[in-house]
Structure formats: C-alpha cells, structure tokens
Image (tube, helix red, strand yellow):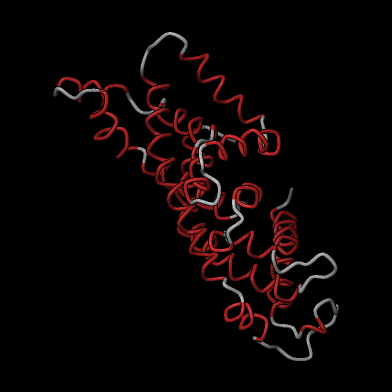
C-alpha cells in the first residue's frame, strides 16, 4: 500500500475515532433544547457543567471512586506480583494446574457470579461498606498472567546473584524483581485504576447508601424511569472522564512497553 494511501486511511480512522468525543464535548456546551440538533449550536453555555458541579454531589461520587480505585490498584499490584513471582520461579507440585485454573477464570464474567458474590458479601457484612467495594475487585487473573509472562523474561542470573548474597525468596522478589518490573506494574496500575473507576455493576449491587455511590452509579441516578436529563448525564460523563484521561496519558508509554515486553499481541 502506498505511503500516501496509508496516511489517508490513518486520518480517516482517526477522524472516525475522535468524532464521538468531539460530539460529546460540543453537546455538553449546547443549550438543553438543542442537545440532539445536528446543526452547530446557536450559543455555547456552561450551564450543564455548572449544574452538575453545584447541584449533583459529583465530588462525593468521584472521591468514592478514587478511594476504591486506588485501594484496589495498590493491593492488587502487591498480591498479584507475589503470586506471579511464585508461579514463574518457584517449583512446587501442581504449579501449572494452579496457573491454568487462574487463567480459566478469565472465561467467567461478573454477571455469572454476581448472585453468589452478593450472598457471600452479605454473610460477611460487607454490603454498604468500602470493604465490600474493594475486596471483590482485587483478584483478576489478567494481572497475574501479565506479570508472570513478564517475570519469565527476567534473567535468572540476577536472582542467583541475590541468592549468593543471602537473599531469600521474599528479598529477591522485593529487591530484584519488583524494581525491574516497574514498567509492567505501571501499566497494570493504569488498567486497574481505569477498570475500577468505570465499574458499575458490582457497586450498584453492593451499595444502597447514597454516601457510598461511585461516580458511574451516581451518573445513572440522573436517568429516570420516564425520562432522562441527557444534558446533565453528558456533562457528568465529561467530568468523570477527566481522571481516567489523566491516568491514561501518564501511563500510556509504560503500558505499550509492558505489552511489547511480555510478548502479547
């Protein structure tokens, strides 16, 4: 394919990708009565954004999402890294079976286990608590899989040198493996943060207290049974997307590096 034709195709794909985002930004700045017009807005207004910022507790929703997302990300990175290191380096019976069972959970979606998960959380008294939002979201097989693949690429000689210095498994993991795996940990941090920031189904199921609503559940309250204030929904969506955009921009380089290093396509 000629270079010029590839460039044209690239520009067309970029325009198709960016067009919905441009429409969203323009729609947020439209007057409510012109929201679905296909023409240019007669005027631009900040009324939609100001209403959401002043009349809707969007700040509280975003704080709740931040608490849950940061807590899940930090705890998951530590536990997933330890589990992946054990599966990549330790030799014990059933290691491959355990790894296969972990990876097989990727085939099970949340709606399948939603009812059993709710019943367990209810028996443990985790409903309407931060712990109920955080604990079920910590485990994810993709994190363990990605970290294991990355750890397999680390030369064993580095760990053997640490072993000669008297380091046990824990010190090898903490002082040798973790510093070398900063790119993949950073990329996973971005993925975990984005996934939990955008979580909706489990937070909706596990909480009834308005003070514990995360941002996606809070946005859904702007939609009623017989009508929806779409101008406010779109404005809240734009506000909620700002932290995710910042997280992705800060971590996109390490995300690409980690995927290339781990051998994933």
Quarter of the image where the C terminus is located: top right
- Residue at 39%, 11% in the rendered image: 92
For image coordinates 45% across by 47% down, the residue present is 73
- Image check: 74 left or right of 208? left
Q: Viewed as shown, does residue 22 lie left or right of 176?
A: right
- Residue 208 sits in quarter: bottom right
- Give the quadrant of residue 180: top left
Nearer to the camera, 85 or 259: 85
**Foreground of the two, 32 or 8:** 32
Image location of residue 131, percent across then percent down: 47, 46
Q: Position of residue 40 (x, y in %)?
A: 80, 84
Q: Is residue 19 above or below residue 160?
A: below
Asked if residue 155 is positioned above or below residue 118 in the image, the reply reads above
Tell me the residue at 52%/14% (across/down).
97
> Residue reaching furthest left?
165
Q: Residue furthest top?
A: 93
């Amino acid at each position: 394919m000629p270079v010029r034709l590839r460039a044209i195709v690239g520009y067309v794909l970029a325009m198709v990708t960016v067009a919905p985002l441009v429409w969203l930004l323009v729609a947020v700045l439209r007057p409510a009565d012109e929201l679905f017009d296909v023409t240019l807005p007669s005027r631009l207004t900040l009324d939609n954004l100001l209403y959401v910022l002043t009349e809707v507790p969007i700040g509280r929703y975003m704080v709740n999402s931040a608490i849950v997302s940061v807590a899940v990300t930090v705890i998951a990175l530590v536990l997933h890294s330890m589990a992946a290191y054990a599966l990549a380096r330790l030799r014990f019976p059933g290691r491959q079976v355990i790894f296969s069972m972990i990876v097989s959970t990727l085939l099970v979606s949340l709606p399948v286990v939603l009812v059993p998960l709710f019943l367990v959380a209810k028996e443990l008294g985790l409903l309407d608590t931060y712990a109920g939002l955080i604990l079920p979201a910590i485990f994810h097989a993709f994190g363990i899989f990605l970290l294991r693949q990355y750890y397999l690429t680390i030369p064993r000689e580095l760990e053997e040198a640490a072993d000669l210095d008297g380091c046990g498994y824990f010190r090898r993991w903490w002082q040798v493996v973790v510093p070398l795996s900063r790119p993949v940990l950073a990329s996973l941090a971005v993925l975990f943060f984005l996934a939990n920031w955008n979580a909706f189904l489990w937070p909706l199921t596990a909480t009834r207290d308005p003070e514990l609503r995360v941002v996606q559940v809070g946005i859904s309250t702007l939609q009623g049974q017989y009508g929806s204030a779409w101008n406010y929904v779109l404005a809240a969506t734009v506000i909620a997307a700002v932290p995710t955009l910042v997280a992705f921009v800060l971590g996109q380089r390490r995300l690409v590096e980690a995927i290339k290093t781990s051998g994933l396509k």
